[in-house]
Image (cartoon, helix red, strand yellow):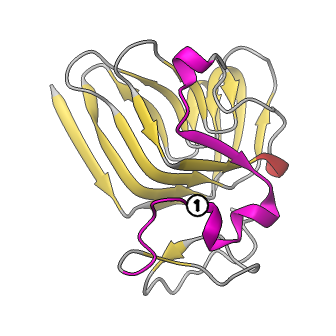
């Protein structure tokens, strides 16, 4: 198995896809299980067919567990069908997958669902939709490290990495 570990990474730009389309990563699971922590996507995503999400297209796993911590999506998300399309995750599997303290900008999405298969038993309670205004406030991001990792210019920017010269002020991707 490939066990990926991604930390303090970001994506920007435009993403277009038919299947498993995500602003940060397409598929996390199967042979590519692992952890994504302290990361964000400001990519604009257009998902045409199914399994599209602002951050991840599909998150599903067997062993080891696929997990996402302290991450967000704030690019524009456009879904052209309603087959597993979510503001954060297109499809989140039924077993073992976990997303914690992660957020998405619901004002920039054509869907109201956090996960395309939006069921409390599968989507979980670690993905939170927030308005653009809320996404630009430090207090929104529970359990995030604003001392060592993240910074924010209150009411003006989305969170960004300390020392990052490419501050995501507008969130246009």
Q: Position of residue 140 (x, y in %)?
A: 64, 62
Q: Please tell me which residue is depicted at 61% across the width and 20% down the height of the picture.
A: 120
Location of residue 170 with respect to 2 vertically, above or below: below
Report which residue position mark 1 lands on: 12
Q: Position of residue 59 (x, y in %)?
A: 44, 27
Please name whichever residue, 88 or 155, is drawn nearer the observer in this view of the structure: 155
Q: Is residue 33 left or right of residue 87?
A: left
Crowding at mark 1 (Cα within 10 Å: few <14, some 14-19, many 20+): some
For the magenta stretch, what is the residue range?
Answer: 120-147
In magenta stretch: residue 54: no
Q: Please tell me which residue is depicted at 43% across the width and 87% down the height of the picture.
A: 163
Dot 1 falls on a residue whose secondary structure is loop
Please name whichever residue, 2 or 111, is drawn nearer the observer in this view of the structure: 111
Q: Is residue 113 left or right of residue 43?
A: right
Q: Please tell me which residue is depicted at 81% across the width and 66% down the height of the picture.
A: 133
Q: Is residue 166 left or right of residue 94?
A: right
In magenta stretch: residue 121: yes
Location of residue 16 with respect to 31 vertically, above or below: below
> Residue 157, located in which quarter of the rendered image?
bottom right
Pick the quarter of the image with the N terminus: top left
């Amino acid at each position: 198995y490939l066990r990926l570990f991604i930390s303090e990474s970001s994506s920007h730009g435009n993403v277009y896809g038919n299947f498993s389309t995500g602003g940060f990563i397409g598929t996390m699971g199967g042979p590519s299980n692992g952890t994504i922590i302290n990361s964000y996507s400001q990519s604009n995503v257009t998902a045409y067919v199914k399994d599209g999400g602002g951050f991840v297209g599909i998150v599903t796993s067997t062993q080891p567990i696929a997990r996402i911590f302290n991450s967000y999506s704030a690019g524009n998300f456009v879904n052209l069908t309603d087959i597993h399309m979510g503001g954060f995750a297109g499809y989140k599997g039924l077993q073992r997958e976990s997303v914690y303290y992660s957020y998405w900008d619901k004002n920039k999405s054509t869907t109201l669902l956090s996960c395309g298969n939006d069921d409390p038993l599968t989507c979980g309670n670690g993905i939170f939709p927030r308005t653009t205004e809320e996404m630009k406030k430090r207090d929104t991001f529970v359990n995030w490290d604003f001392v060592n990792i993240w910074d924010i210019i209150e009411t003006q920017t989305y969170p960004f990495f300390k020392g990052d010269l490419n501050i995501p002020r507008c969130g246009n991707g």
